[in-house]
Amino acid sequence: MTTRLKVNENSTSLRRDVKRLGKILGEVLVHHGGQELLEKVETIRKLAKELRTNYNEDTYQTLKNEMENLERPMRRQVIRAFSKYFHLVNVAELNHRIRRRREYQLMENNLVQPASIDSAIQAFKSKNLSEDAIQNVLDTLSLELIITAHPTESTKRSILEIQKRIAGLLKQHDNPMLTRKERKLIDQELFEEITIMWQTDELRLTRPTVMDEVRNGLYYFDQTLFDVLPDIHQEVQDALHENYPTYNWNVPNFLTFGSWIGGDRDGNPNVTPEVTWQTLHKQNKLVLKKYTDAVISLMRRFSHSTNRIKASSKLIQSIVEEEQLYLTADSKWQVETEVYRRKFAVIVERLKATGKTEKGYTDSEELLKDLQLIQESFAIHQPKDHEQKDLQKLIRQVRLFGFHLATLDIRNHSGEHEAAISEIMKKVGIADDYSSLDEDNKMKILESVLKDPRPILLLNEDYSAQTQEMIKTFQMIRDAHKKFGKRAITVYLISMTQSASDLLEVLVLAKEAGIYRLHADGTVESHLNVAPLLETIDDLVAGPDIMQTLFELPVYKNHLIQHGNQQEIMLGYSDGSKDGGTLTANWKLYRAQREIHEMASRYKIGLKFFHGRGGSLGRGGGPLNKSILSQPAETLGDGVKITEQGEVLSSRYLLEDIAFRSLEQAISTLLKAFAHISNNELDQSQKDKWETAMEDISAVSLKKYQSLVFFDDDFMTYFKEATPLNEIGNLKIGSRPMSRKSKQTFEDLRAIPWVFAWTQSRQLLPAWYAAGTGLTAFADKDGKNIDILKEMYEKWPFFRSTIDNLQMALMKADLTTAREYSALVEDEAIGTRIYNNIKEEYNKTKAILLEISGEAELLDHTPTIQESVHRRNPYVDPLNFFQVELIKQLRDQETPDPELLNQVLLTINGIAAGLRNTG
C-alpha cells in the first residue's frame, strides 16, 4: 500500500484547483454539520493518507476504530463528504485538460500538442504524402461512435449539471484579466454551487425508465455533440488549408454518432417497438429544434441588403415562389431588400411544420438544398478565401444529423429470433420443430423462404405475445424508414451469434415486414444491414467460418450487393473477457478480426468492425485513441465503429471543450495510423514471431483464468460474498436487469455487474487476472523471450495498448483493501484461499509488466494518470472500509435496514466516482 509519487510539473494548476475546491467543500461541511464533521473527515483523510505513504498496522487500526465508532448520522455525512470530493476532483481534472490544450495553443514556438489534429497533419508532411494520397485517406476515413445506456453511470443528471457549472467557473478563474472583485464573486458562486451539490440527493429514488435513459443520451447531443462534430470536421479542413493551401480539399463526414438507447432490446423487456418509436420521435423533435434555433440565429446576422450586394436570381426566384406557398402575411419578412432574411423566414416556417403538415420538409435533403442556395448566392459577394463559417457549419450539421439526429441500432438475442421463426414455420407447415433441426436443415429452409417472394406470415393474433412483439419490431423499422429516413435505423445486431442461420432468420423477419424484398423478376431490395455480434471465446473462433458460409450463399450475396458489398460485424469485449480473461479475450478478438478481414478480402467484401468496448477496463475500456490503435492496422481502412458506454459519457462529452479534445485525439490517432499504412511503414517482419508468442501467452493465461473462474467450486461463493454484487442490484441506475434471466448463474450474469462488483471491491479481477501467469510463463521458457516481449511493447500498438491497460488495472486495484472484502466470505478458509490466489497473481502480473515496460512503477509513462490515481486513493480507501463494515452489518440482518442499505449505496456511488478512468 506504500506508494512513491513523482511530482508532475504540469499539474501545478490542477493541484491549486483541487485545493481551492476542497477548501470550499470544508466550509460547506462546517456550515451543515459543524466543526465536528469537518474534523472527523480530516482525521480520517489524514490517517488514510498516512497509510498510503507509510503503511503501519497501528495507523490502520486507529483508522478502523475511528470509522467504526461513528454514530449513524455522522457516518452518513462523512461518506457523503468523501463522495462529493470526487465529484469536485473530476471537474477539476476535466478543466485541467481544457487548460492544457489552451496552453499549447498559446505557445509562441508553435509547439503542437500531441494527439491533436495539427499533429496528425504534421505526420502527413513528415511522411511526404501527396495531397491526392491525403484526400484518399479522408475519403476512406470513418469513425462511428455509438452511445449506450449501460447502467454504470451512477451520477445523477442534476449532479452532472452542477459539475458543468463548476467547470465553467473554474475556467473563468483562469482569466488573467480578472479583477480582485471578480475573483471574489467567482469564489462566492463556487461556494453556492458546492452548497447546492451538498444539498442534492446522490441516489435515484426510482429506477430510470428507458425513456429517462433516452433523455439522458439526448442531453449530450443537445449540449455538446451537435456543435462539436462539425467543429472537428472544420478543424481538419482548416489544418489542411493551412499546410497545403493550393489544394481544393473536400472533407467528408468521417465522424458520426449513433445510439443504442431505446433500440437495444437484448435482455431488456422494457424496450418495446412503441418505446423505440418514441425514441425516434424525440430525436427528430430535438434535431428540428436545433436547426430552427440555428436558422433564427443566422437570420439575425444576415442583414445584407440588395441595395448593397447582388444576390443570385435563383435565390430570389425561390423566395418569391415560396413566400406564396408557405408564409402568411404575419410570418413573412417585411423588408423586401433583405433577401437572406426573407429566405430564412421561409425555412423557419417549413421546419416548424415538418412532420405536422404538408408545408413541412419531406426530408433533410430539401432543407440542405435551401441552405446551399443561400451559400451559392453568398459566394457572389463574399471575399474569396473567407467562407461564411456559421452557414457552412449548419450545412455540415444537416448532412451529419439529417432529420433523425443519430442512427439507432436495433439489437436482440439470437434465441429470440429463433423462437419467433420456429413458431411462424410451424403455423404455415414448413417445419414442425424448427429449433431442433441441425444447422444444414435450418439453412435450407431459410434459404428457400428468402428465395420465394410470397409472404409466410399469418395475421398477428395467430401468434404468441413474444412472436407478435418480434413482428411489430420489424414493422416499426419499416415505418421508421418511411417517416424519418433510412438513416434512422440501418443496422440490426444479433447478440450471441453462433451460426449462419442466426443471420438468415433476421433476414426472413425483415422480408415479412417488407424491409427485404425479392421481386418477381428476381431483383432484390434490402434496407437493413444484418450484423452478427461475436461475444464468447468460442463464437470468436467460429466467426470466420460463419461469415464464409454466408459470403458463399447466393441469397446472402444478393443482400450484400444492396449494401455495397459491405458487412458489419460486432465484436463483444465484455463477455469474451468474462469467459476467458482480458488477455485471452483481447488476443482472440484481434485474431478474429485479422482472419475475417483476410477471408472477406478474398470474396471482395468490405468490412466494418463494431467494437463493443465497455467504459471500464474489464470490459475492453480505456482511452478512445488507444482503443483505436489496438486494432489490426489493416482493418482500420474498413471503418471503425465503437460503443461509448454510459459510464464514460459525462467524462468525455459533458463539456464542449472536453468533447472536442476526446474526439480530436481519436481522429488524430486514426489519421496517423493511415499515414503509416499509406507510406507502407508497418513493420511486418516480426509479425509471425509476435503472433506465435501471443498464442502461447494466451493459451497459458486462459488455462489459469478458467482454473479459478470455472473449475474452482468455491469461486462463485467468493465472488458473491467478497464483492457488493447483491447490493449493487439495489442501486437504481439502469432500466435493464442485472441477469439475462431470473437465474443467478455465472452464464446468465451480465458482464456489467460482473465487472462493477469486482471494481468496487478494488480487486478488478476481470481487468488483469491470469495475464501475469501467461506473460511470465512465456518469459521463463527461454532467456531471449523477455527481449521479444520488450520488442512487442515497443513496436506493436496492440501489445502496447494491452500492457498499458493492464498497468492501469493494477494501479486502480488495491489488494490491501481487497483483503477487507475477502473477510466478508462466511467460510474463512474459502475467503483466505481465493484471496491469496488473487494476491499472488497480482504480484506476478505487476512484476512482469514492469519488466516488459522497463518502468520502476506502474504508469510511469503517464504521470498525469498516475498522479490522479495517487491523489484519489486516500479518499477512496475510507469509502471501501465503510462499505465492508456496512455490508457486514446488512448481511447479518434478517430484514435489511433501509438506512443501512442507503449508506451502502452511497459508498458504491462514491467509489464509482473515485475510480473513474482518467486521461
Image (cartoon, rainbow, N blue to C red):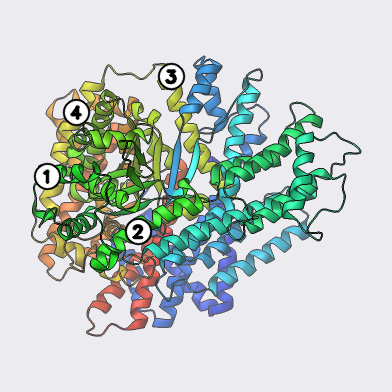
C-alpha separation, residue under disc 1 versus residue under disc 2: 25 Å
Q: Which of 297 and 770 is in front in this view?
A: 297
Q: In this view, does 603 lie to the left or right of 346?
A: left
**Residue 537 placement (x, y as % from top left):** 18, 44
Badge 3 marks a residue whose secondary structure is helix
For image coordinates 26% across by 38% down, the residue present is: 589
Judging by the rendered image, the residue that carries numbered circle 3 is 678
What mark, if any, has residue 693 been given in the picture?
4
Task: Report the mark closest to the observer, 3 or 1.
Answer: 1
Q: How far apart are marks 4 and 1 (CA)?
A: 35 Å
Does any portion of residue 800 appear in the rendered image?
Answer: no
Which residue lies under the disc numbered 2? 473
**Which amino acid does the dot numbered 1 rest on?**
Glu
> Is residue 891 placed above or below 610 in the rendered structure?
below
Q: Is mark 2 on a helix, strand or loop?
A: helix
- Write down the residue under mark 1: 439
Amino acid type at image mark 2: Thr
Q: Position of residue 384 (x, y in %)?
A: 76, 26
Numbered disc in front, either 4 or 1 = 1
Name the N-terminal-most of marks 4 and 3. 3
| Image location (x, y in percent) of residue 92 | 55, 54
Label located before the other in sequence (3 or 2): 2
Q: Are marks 4 and 2 in contact (CB under 8 Å)?
A: no
